[in-house]
Amino acid sequence: MGTSTYMGRDKGVDLKDAVGFFSWDLNENKVFADSVFAYIYGIPPHELEIGAPIEQVIKHVAEDDMPRVAKALHETIVSGKPCFQTYRISHPTGKSIVVTGQGRCLRNGDGMPSIYTGLVTAEENGAKAQEADPLASHCMEALKLAKRRRHALAERYLTSALGALGRRADN
């Protein structure tokens, strides 16, 4: 699996180390979340700052995973027990993102389900994730050019650079 860098307001965040936080107000049907969560689900951050409907969030869950995710959410809301699951997101940009989420539904003073809160982590899946790094793409193109021109030293350096970026030079 590859990773991607999410560019926040003032710094880059590597998804392999990033955690997105959310709270879903069940009575208002509004999900509030941070910018990492917004990136993972492909939702503009300002929409989650003011609260977006849960339907806007879960519509990106992969079709094959949706029944299992919906069932787990329902069971957690009803029981109040913690939920831990992994599922795929079909990101609006076309990326495939694997999400691991943890959550729990909190009760109000009357014992009724009130706030579902939790966190998500994610990794991009497949070749598209690796192509997201422009430096690796440029090195790969330069390597092709070095091979065509038979520049062995440049080829060795570029192969080494790709290795440092976690990419394999295809022979």
Image (cartoon, rainbow, N blue to C red):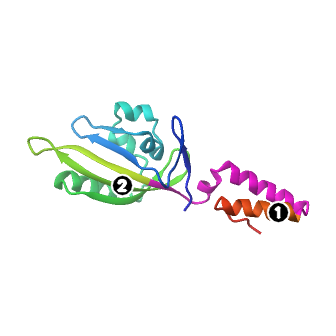
Amino acid carrying label 1: it is: Glu
Question: How far from the left and from the top, in percent, is residue 98?
Answer: 46, 57
Amino acid carrying label 2: it is: Gly
Q: How dense is the environment of label 1, judged by Cα within 10 Å: few (below 14), some, or many (20 and up)?
A: many
Q: Is residue 151 left or right of residue 27?
A: right
**Camera-side residue of 78 and 101:** 101
Mark 1 residue element: helix
Dot label at residue 60: none
Question: How far from the left and from the top, in percent, is residue 127?
Answer: 62, 59
Image quadrant containing the N terminus:
bottom right
Q: Is residue 52 left or right of residue 110?
A: right
Q: How dense is the environment of label 2, judged by Cα within 10 Å: few (below 14), some, or many (20 and up)?
A: some
Which residue corresponds to mark 1?
155
Image quadrant containing the C terminus:
bottom right
Within the image, what quadrant is residue 148 found in? bottom right
Residue extending furthest toward the bottom:
171
Question: How far from the left and from the top, in percent, is residue 23?
Answer: 30, 42
Question: How far from the left and from the top, in percent, is residue 60?
Answer: 43, 48
> What residue is at 33 percent from the left and 41 percent from the top?
54
Q: Is residue 78 left or right of residue 145?
A: left
> What residue is at 21 percent from the left and 51 percent from the top?
77
Q: Is residue 162 left or right of residue 148?
A: left
Within the image, what quadrant is residue 144 found in? bottom right
Residue extending furthest toward the right:
149
Which residue corresponds to mark 2?
101
Mark 1–mark 2 distance (CA, rounded to whole Å): 42 Å
Instruction: Assess whether residue 135 is covered by the magenta stretch.
Output: yes
Secondary structure character of the magenta stretch overall: helix
**Span colored in magenta:** 122-151
